Amino acid sequence: MTEQVAEAFTPVRRQALSDAVFEQLRARIVNGDLAAGAPLPAERILCEALGVNRSSVREALRRLEQARLISVRHGGTSHILDYRESAGLDLLAALLVNAGGFDARVVRGVMEMRSAIAADAARLAATRADATVADRLDSVVHAMSEAGGDLVRLQSLAVSFWSAIIDASDNIAYRLAYNSLRETYDQCRALLVEALAGELRDVPRYAAIADGVRRGDAAAAEHLARELARRGEESIGRILRRLDTASTVDGGIR
C-alpha cells in the first residue's frame, strides 16, 4: 500500500474501535474510494493507517464480509465487492448521507419503495387481518384526528399506522424491508415533515384505509393506500427536482 493510499485514512478516536473501522471502510467502499474488484489493504497496513489494533480490524472485516461489501478469498486476501450487486437493504441507511448532505437518489428511492410496499401490504392486510388489527388501525386514526394538525405528532402516528398495516399483511419480507426503510427514513424525517404535510393531514384517507381493511375490501385498501403514499412521494419528488435543477443544497438534501 502506497503512502498516498495510507494517508486517505484517518486515525480512529472516541468510538468502539471495530465500529469506527467498519464505518470508515464501509464509507470508502460505497463512495467508490475503494473500487469494486480491488484488493483491500492488508491487515497490518490497515492497523497502521487507522491507528488501531489487529483485533479491531479483523472484527470490522468480518462485519464487512457479512454485509457483503468484501469477499475474503483463500489465504485471507480480501477484495472489494460491488455493493450494488451484492449488498442488501441493511446498507440503505448508510447510503443516505453523502458528503455531509442527503443523497437525493436514495431519498427518492425510499419514497418510491414505500409507495409500492404500502399499497400491496394494505391489500394483503384486508385479505388476512382480523378484527384486532382493524381496532389497532382505528386507534391510530383516532389519535391522528386528535392531533390537531401537529405534523410531528402526525408523522409519528403515520409510522405506527403503516407498521400496523405491514404486520397485518403477514409478509415477513415486507416487514424486514419496512424496517430498513424506516431506519433510513428516520434519519431525515425532520426534514421531510413539512413536505409530507398534505399526506399526513389527510386523516380521512387513513380512516378509509382502515375501513377497507376491516371490511376485507382488498381492492379499496390497496387503491387508497397507493394514492395516499404517492401523494407524499410526488411532493418529495417535486422538491428534489427543484433542487436538482437549481444545483443547490436546501435543508441538507442534495
Image (cartoon, helix red, strand yellow):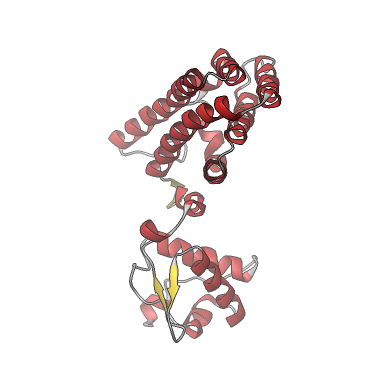
> Which residue is at the front of the view, 78 or 244?
78
- Quadrant where the C terminus lies? top left
The quadrant of the picture occupied by the N terminus is bottom left
What residue is at 28 percent from the left and 34 percent from the top? 245
Residue plotted at (52% across, 73% down): 61
Residue 40 image offset from top left, x and y in percent = 41, 76
Q: In the image, is residue 46 above or below residue 65?
A: below
- Residue 70 is situated, as x and y percent measured from the top left of the image, at 44, 70
Residue 46: where, in percent of width, then height?
49, 79
> Can residue 210 be seen in the rendering of this structure?
yes
Query: From this viewpoint, is residue 11 visible?
Result: no
Identity of the residue drawn at 42% across and 71% down: 8
In the picture, measured across the screen, residue 222 lies left or right of residue 151, that is: left
Q: Locate residue 1 relative to residue 61 in the image: left or right.
A: left
User: Total number of numbered labels?
Assistant: 0
Q: Residue furthest top?
A: 204
Q: Nearer the viewer, residue 21 or 75?
A: 75
Which of the two residues, 118 or 93, is positioned nearer the viewer here? 118
Query: Whole-percent x and y of residue 175?
Result: 57, 42
Residue at 55%, 26% (x, y): give it.
Answer: 127
Q: Residue 143 sits in which quadrant?
A: top right
Q: Quadrant of residue 14?
A: bottom right
